[in-house]
Image (tube, rainbow, N blue to C red):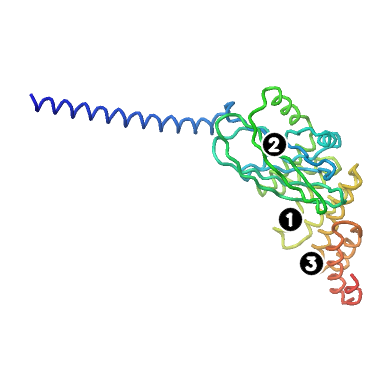
Amino acid sequence: MLMIAAMAQASAAAIDNAISGLEAEVSRHAASVHTLEQQLRKTIDTRVAVFLSLANPEALDLDSVELFLNGRPVGNHIFTLSERESLEDGRSYPLFTGYMADGNHQLTAVINARAVNKRFVRREVVHPFRKVSGAMQLQMSIDATGPDYEPRVSLDKQPWAGAATSEAGNAAIARPNRQKELLQDAEQARQQGRLDKAGQILAGMKEGYLAAVGYMNLAADFAETDLDPSRALVALRVAMSMAAHDTESARSRDLLDQLHLRAGYLALNNEEYDKALGFLEKVSLDSYHAPRALYLHGLALSGKENHRGAMQS
């Protein structure tokens, strides 16, 4: 009888252990299913929105923001005059709405703006964050103070503000702008290495700032992949023509200065000194790019053995 009782106790303990092991396995399986579900399904609790605001509207005139999540481009927004005025009034602007699984992520923003001291700035900021269960908003706040007016970005995690905010944000993001969509398509093709496809998309865009930016980026890829700068210079000339039709004169002038500087650099590297001088002499002397242009101008004159002129530049 003692042996039978001992065997019964051992059997019960084995069953208890088996049940405990099974419960632990079910728990692990449930967690795995939840993670997989978040990756495959766009459930409500995986929703993430990114909003932008200006902490010091008088310091920066925001031009555009490029947004990346975990290294993947998710937005490239160029602000219109009415949108900038809205930001200056203290409102937040929706940059992105999407879905993300719980865990660690990284938000990268590339900011292009003009400071109150008339200097154009382009800065990249990186913010890691952790997504926990539940819908979440990320509030990006851009600040800049004198005397340098360097953009600084803070990131604040907030709970989801509700359906009304979500719908308003989605409506703002979904506003039709065919030119921005074309530029995004061209940028995606360019980043995938399909440069000919990017050129075809850009050819369908209207003249103006967006098309000029697209051709400038395409020229940078041509310059990196081609031994001869011909294609890059052609793309830059097209960008110059597009930029000349920008309705905002200050932005157009700054972009043209950048384009002439890049074209001069390419021509100089190809030892086409006269062509380089022609481009560089079109850079405005009161622009942010003037010191670089003058330096390259001096190198071009030196290449022509005009050393006195080179030293003056």
Amino acid tagged 3: Asn
Residue position marked by numbered label 3 in the rendering: 270
Between 195 and 109, the one nearer to me in the picture:
109
Q: Secondary structure at mark 1?
A: helix
Between 219 and 119, the one nearer to me in the picture:
119
Residue 89 image label: none
Residue 306 drawn at (x, y percent): 90, 76
Between 111 and 6, the one nearer to me in the picture:
6
Amino acid tagged 1: Phe
Q: Is residue 184 visible?
A: no
Mark 1 vs mark 2: give the one in front.
Answer: 2
Residue 44 drawn at (x, y percent): 59, 26
Mark toward the start of the polypeptide (1 vs 2): 2
Residue 216 drawn at (x, y percent): 79, 51
Mark 2 vs mark 3: give the one in front.
Answer: 2
Report the quarter where the N terminus lies: top left
Mark toward the start of the polypeptide (2 vs 3): 2
Which residue is found at the position 67% from the left and 26% from the top? 161
Amino acid tagged 2: Gln
Which residue is found at the position 23% from the left and 30% from the top? 14
Residue 115 drawn at (x, y percent): 84, 48
Mark toward the start of the polypeptide (1 vs 3): 1
Residue 75 occupies quadrant: top right
Residue position marked by numbered label 1 in the rendering: 222
Residue position marked by numbered label 2 in the rendering: 139
Q: CA distance from mark 1 to mark 3?
A: 14 Å
Which residue is found at the position 83% from the left and 50% from the top? 239
